[in-house]
Amino acid sequence: MNASQSSGARLEGLDLARYVAFVGMVIVNFKIAMGAEDQTGLLNNLTTALEGRAAATFVVLAGIGLGLAGRKGLDQTISVTVKRAIFLLLLGLLNMTIFDADILHYYAFYFLFGVLLLPLANGALFTVLIGLNIVFTLMILGLDYDAGWNWDDYTYSGFWTPVGFVRNLFFNGWHPVIPWLGFLVFGIILSRISLAQRATQATLVLGGIVTFAGAGLISGALGAQLGQIDPELAELVTTEPVPPMPLYMLAGLGAASIVVGICLMVSDHLKTLGLLQLIVPAGRQTLTLYIAHILIGMGTLEALGMLEGQSVANAVVASVLFCLVATLYALVWARWFKRGPIEAAMRKLAG
């Protein structure tokens, strides 16, 4: 494989990873929206494993993209990133009026802080990643994580107040900057290694498996012991996304590494089979499809009266159907347009 082929395969492999993360995110959000939580069975366990992992993979991929963009010139990257962060913030806050679990306004701040970290060496970036987890653990111990939350219906009071917004953004929201910025930082680090090399891809997969499994084993062992002392202590070693404790972050980083590594490894084979070309357009329009899965996907479910009391199987079927339609749309759209409609609008307004 020559250099140009490696570069192309690498980019398409990342598009494939975005598509995989998008499908996982749709399954998670539809499952929650359709009231299919707290059920049992293999399918429930598999979908529960996606919670917090699909979104984490998205943020890692965003970090890879930011790191690659930084190679073209730091000053230009900072200027464009700040403008796009403002675009995402406004779009995310607008989305918050209909979807409380919006992630776009968090992305705005991931990018704002992330672009400022681009000049740092990898060692310093790892220090930032570790520091974010230490700071969050101290915050959990010293602050009220439940502030603003009604966990019965997942509503958050005071979000639109200055104090509530900052608290939600940095501490106890669905994807708080502390410690979720660490996923973006990890992506920046990955952007600096030879992702096109098979050895690197294999290392990502194997390292991801060890990290993901290790976090789960440690969580299970420590959680059982701490739970006997005080059930609340067990939350300090959880791998669940809420609250995002260090072992969750490890599990999320492991899952993202597995997805990125595998997608990079299989992209050439899928391209030979003619399958990759069907998927890549959707992987390049995930911002548009993210908004679509809320407005169109959940809107359709609401119209059909399927937002409450559904089974996990129904949620998965609805997710798969939506993703198939979204994939077909993106394929058709890409025949005439280079970018998705929202991606194009962001590029026009923010550069």
Image (cartoon, helix red, strand yellow):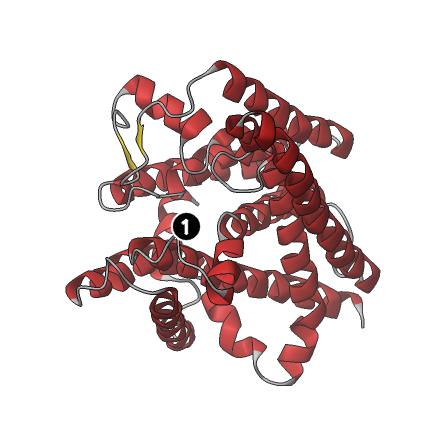
**Vertical order, 243 against 293 (above or below):** above
Point 36% across, 58% down: residue: 31
Q: Is residue 48 left or right of residue 2?
A: left
Point 22% across, 65% down: residue: 300
Point 49% across, 34% down: residue: 243
**Viewport quadrant of the C terminus:** top left
Point 61% across, 28% down: residue: 133
Which residue is at the far top?
142
Q: Is residue 328 left or right of residue 95?
A: right
Q: Position of residue 254 (x, y in %)?
A: 67, 49
Asked whether residue 120 appears in the rendered view, the answer is no
**Viewport quadrant of the N terminus:** bottom right
Quarter-of-image position of residue 338: bottom left
Q: Nearer the viewer, residue 285 or 149?
A: 149
Callout 1: SS: helix
Asked whether residue 106 appears in the rendered view, the answer is yes
Q: Position of residue 272 (x, y in %)?
A: 66, 83
Residue for badge 1: 347
Q: Nearer the viewer, residue 184 or 27?
A: 27
Q: Is residue 309 left or right of residue 24?
A: left
Which residue is at the far right?
199
**Vertical order, 351 against 26 (above or below):** above
